[in-house]
Structure formats: C-alpha cells, structure tokens
Amino acid sequence: MILIVFILLLFTVMLFHVGRHTRSNRYLGVYFISQILVLVNLAFNPFYEVVFFLLQSIIFSWGAFYYLFVSSLLDRHYVFKPIYLLQFIPVPVGFFLLLADYYFPANQFLEVHAPFLRDHSKAMHNFLFNGLIIGYNIATVVKYYHFRKDVTKGVQLKNTLHPVWLNISIWGFIVSCLCNQTGNYLNLTMPDVGFDWMNIGLAAFLIYFCVLFYVAVSSRILLEKYESKEKYKNSKLPEAEAIALLASIEHCITEKRLFTNQELKLKDLAEQLTITERTLSQLINFYRKQNFSDFINSYRIEYAKQLLADPLQKDKTILWILFESGFNSKATFNTLFKKVVGCTPAEYRKTLR
C-alpha cells in the first residue's frame, strides 16, 4: 500500500508540475490524489472518526474521476459542465452509510429510529461502491467503442495520443477493477482461509500504476509540452478561437453541402468563410490530421452512405450516388469507401436490405 502511495505521489507531481497541462492529465492527477488520501487514511488512520469516514467516502468519487479522465482523453475538447457534479452525489450518500455502519453514536441512533438502515448499511455501501465501479467501467467501454466506431466511419479522427497510453489507461484500469472485485468476492465466500484476497486487487493496481507510469515516461507523454502551443506560437490565432473557427467550418460544409461540388478547392472554401487559405489549411491539418482533399472526402463518404441507405434512392445507381456526393471518379470513390466503411458501396447497400 505504501509503495502505491509513493508511485501515485511521484506520478501526481509529474502530472501537475512537469507534464503538459491537458484536461485529461488534470483529471488523472485529481483521481490519484483521491487514491492517496484514502490509502493514507487506511494505512495510518491519523484522524478523528468522523474525519476518517469523511475521507473514506472519497472512494465513491473514484468512478466519476476516472470517467472524466477517459472522456477528456478521447476528446481533447471535452469541457466539464456543472451538471456533471451530479456524478458526485454518491460521496455524501456513501459518507452517511459509512457512519451508519461504523460510527457508534450514529449506529445507536439508527438502532432506535431506523433499524433496517442500521442492519443493512454495510451491504448498501458495498453495493453502492461496487455498482459505481462496474457502472463506470461499462460506460467507459461503451464510450471507447463509440469513439472507435466514429473513427472508422470518418466522423472522428484517431486520437493523437500514444496508442499504448490510451489502451493501458482504459483497459488496465478495468482489469485492475476486475481483480479487485474478484478479491472482494473471494473474501466474502472464503473468509476462513487465512488470506486477505483484497491483496489481489492491491497487487493489480500496483502493477497498473507502475505500467502506466512507465508508459507515460518512456513515450514522453508527461514530458512533452502541449503541442498546439508550439503549432500556433507564430500565429495570432488563439487556440480557443481556432477551435470555434473549425466548428464554423464544419457547420458551413455540412449545412451548405459544399462537399458535393466536385471542383471544390481550398481557395473556394476559404473565400466562403472569409479566412485565408493558410489558416484553413493549418486548422484542418492540425486539428483533423488530414489534408484538404481527405477532409472533404470524409464528408462525401458520409453523404454517400446516407444516399445508399435512403429507401427513396434505392433505384439510383452507384454512379449517380458518387457524382451526387461530390466524387468525379468511380475508382476513387470505391477505394475510399471501402477504406472507411470496410466494404464496397454495392455491398454496403445490400447489407441494408
């Protein structure tokens, strides 16, 4: 346990004082701090009873902090909204249940006024904690697969983070939680074997944090400063303005269906948006990691998929659809469509019947 605290302290210092200050790093740092507080509280028990239980109730925020970390990891423009604070309601609820179960004055009071709550408070706080962890793990997996699906469809581009860091961050935590849940279950079903099965969970999280720390340092995720500042250090365009402008670009392309113009060029789109070609190219290259042609073609592929799926267009030929979508070459259309969707336009249409 002490070794885990040491690693987390070192990791947290690097996240806040050495590494690039992205939202995901900040959320991860806060999650680590919450882990440190609980582990120190358990190991040394330095506080008065009520304070001890207050710090222990932090465990009910772990799932929320982890989910915020993953959300901001998959979406670098993720912004925390006040409504997300509802995710932390389990903290005061858990605090109350811990008092009901372990704090003697509260236990006595509930014995008289709410005996059912006193008798079942331990089961309730165990159910709350395990339910939160399992629920957030499921939500994370769903979010990750939605992210992968959007990448495959071309709706969203691959995350620019190191792929090992991304996978270890997500799947390492889930596997560690599974080991922890297994240890908890074995403690309940095999209490008399003379071994604390929760050590399985502690060992799993120790390995997870060590591997995560190694990947972060070896891939320079923590040591490299935030790339966008370097990208725009010679530009008068602030990042917040660049992000807003990119949203306007995508809205204009979608609403006016500019991508259906087979002769659309960088200059034409820049004139529509009243910005320079250099700014437009810079935004697309950096934020979408595409050149202008690939950027426009991603919209054309999505529109072609809509036409292929539209029952009103079922009599239209593939040739008509590719021209309607903005392509001027059947070979280019078929190649790009198969690359993005995984099958030819004709095969895609058949799967929808």
Image (cartoon, rainbow, N blue to C red):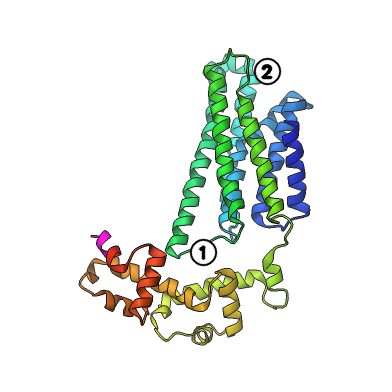
Q: Residue furthest top?
A: 192
Specify the quadrant of the image occupied by residue 105.
top right
Q: Secondary structure at mark 1?
A: loop
Percent across and percent down for residue 89 are 58, 39
Specify the quadrant of the image occupied by residue 47.
top right
Determine the main secondary structure of the stretch shown in magenta: helix
Between disc 2 and disc 1, the foreground one is: 1
Label 2 crowd (10 A; few <14 / some 14-19 / many >=20): few
Percent across and percent down for residue 263 are 42, 86
| Residue occupied by mark 2 | 105
Identify which residue is drawn at 30% across, 63% down.
348
Residue 167 in the magenta stretch? The answer is: no
Specify the quadrant of the image occupied by residue 242.
bottom right
Q: In the shown orientation, is residue 309 left or right of residue 20?
A: left
Give the amino acid type for the residue marked by disc 1 in the picture: Leu
Indicate which disc, 2 or 1, sits on the residue closer to the N terminus.
2
- Say if 346 sits above or below 95 in the image: below
Give the amino acid type for the residue marked by disc 2 in the picture: Pro
Magenta residues, as a range? 349-353
| Residue occupied by mark 1 | 157
- Say if 259 sits above or below 186 in the image: below
Q: In the shown orientation, is residue 1 left or right of residue 122?
A: right
